Each structure stands twice: as structure tokens, then as C-alpha cells.
Image (cartoon, helix red, strand yellow):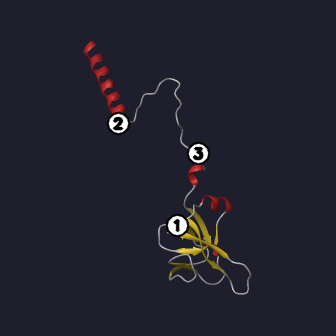
């Protein structure tokens, strides 16, 4: 019986050494502060979802953020699209309407930009959408 207990103790010690060696189990002094993961809201910064809102034609996807850029595709109204970042670009204006929108969204997971004028995104989500890196 004694040899069985010795074997179990040895197995437990070896398992403990393996866990410590792999980094899964670490020792810390008593009372040491431990870091907890950040709340999910803090980690939400990044790509966000938007909805295409056009009245007549599809939304044109441009090669870069400008109405002068090549047309590389289109999206129908109502499509939910993933946006990776926002950037100022060529101001999008509508004939006969004053003002305009200079912001563009880079599509996530594919090439191209769309004008922010025709994409609905919740204002709180917009704050979490990062600026595109300068090129």
C-alpha cells in the first residue's frame, strides 16, 4: 500500500512540474495582485457592422476613398457590411444638396471603400471604429 501512495505522489509531482513548465500553472507570492481580463466593452474597438442605405442605385465600392477612384464593385441597399476603419477622403456630395460627407469606410475582409453617406452605423459603434492607417 505504501508503494502505491509513493507512486501517486510521484505522479502528482510530475504532473505539477509539467504544468509549471508549460506555463499553465505559475506560482505567485501570497497576496500578489493578479490581472483580470479587460471587460468586453474595452475590447470592442475594431471592425464594426453597418447597413447600406441607398434609395435607388447600389452603393459603389471604390478602390480608394474618393469619387474619382475606380469602381471595383457595388452593394445593394439593405446589405449588412463589416467595416474595418474610417478615413477622410474626397467629399461626397449630392447635386442640389448643400454640404457633403468627407468620410469613407474601408471594407473588412475585402478591398475597397464606401462613402459614409450611404452607410448607417450606430453612433456608439462609430466611436469604436478605428481610423484607417495613413498611407
- Return the mark for residue 134: 1
The numbered mark at residue 102 is none
Q: Quadrant of residue 99?
A: bottom right
Disc 1 vs disc 3: Cβ atoms closer than 8 Å?
no
At label 3, counting other C-alpha atoms closer than 10 Å, the crowd grade (few under 14, some 14-19, many 20 or more) is few
> Is residue 1 at least partly visible in the picture?
no
Corner quadrant of residue 27: top left
* Most distant residue in the front direction: 135
Identify residue for label 3.
39
**Would residue 6 appear left or right of 106 to someone viewing this image?**
left
Q: Which residue is drawn at 57% across and 61% down?
A: 130
- Which numbered disc, 1 or 2, marks the residue closer to the eye? 1
Q: Residue 118 appears at what percent x and percent y?
A: 64, 75
Q: Where is residue 32 in the image (x, y as percent from the top left)?
A: 52, 27
Q: Can residue 129 be seen in this view?
A: yes
User: Outermost residue, top direction?
Assistant: 2
Whether tag 3 and tag 2 are in contact, CB under 8 A, the answer is no
Find numbered disc 1 in the image and state the secondary structure of the residue it sits on.
Answer: loop
Q: Quadrant of residue 86?
A: bottom right
Question: Mark 3 vs mark 2: which is more N-terminal?
Answer: 2
Percent of width and height locating residue 46: 55, 58
Residue 96 is left or right of residue 52, and the answer is right
Report the side of 106 relative to 25 (left or right).
Answer: right
- Reading the image, the residue beneath label 2 is 22
Across and down, in percent, residue 100 comes to: 69, 78
Give 131 or 61, whichever is nearer the viewer: 131
Cα separation between marks 1 and 2:
40 Å
Amino acid at each position: 500500500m505504501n508503494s502505491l501512495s509513493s507512486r501517486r505522489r510521484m505522479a502528482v509531482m510530475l504532473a505539477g512540474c509539467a504544468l509549471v513548465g508549460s506555463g499553465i500553472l505559475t506560482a505567485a507570492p501570497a497576496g500578489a495582485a493578479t490581472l483580470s481580463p479587460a471587460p468586453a466593452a474595452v475590447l470592442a474597438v475594431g471592425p464594426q457592422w453597418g447597413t447600406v442605405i441607398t434609395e435607388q442605385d447600389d452603393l459603389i465600392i471604390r478602390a480608394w476613398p474618393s469619387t474619382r477612384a475606380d469602381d471595383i464593385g457595388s452593394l445593394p441597399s439593405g446589405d449588412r457590411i463589416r467595416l474595418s476603419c474610417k478615413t477622410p477622403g474626397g467629399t461626397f456630395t449630392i447635386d442640389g444638396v448643400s454640404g457633403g460627407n468627407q468620410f469613407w469606410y474601408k471594407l473588412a475582409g475585402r478591398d475597397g471603400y464606401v462613402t459614409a453617406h450611404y452607410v448607417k452605423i450606430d453612433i456608439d459603434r462609430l466611436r469604436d471604429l478605428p481610423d484607417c492607417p495613413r498611407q
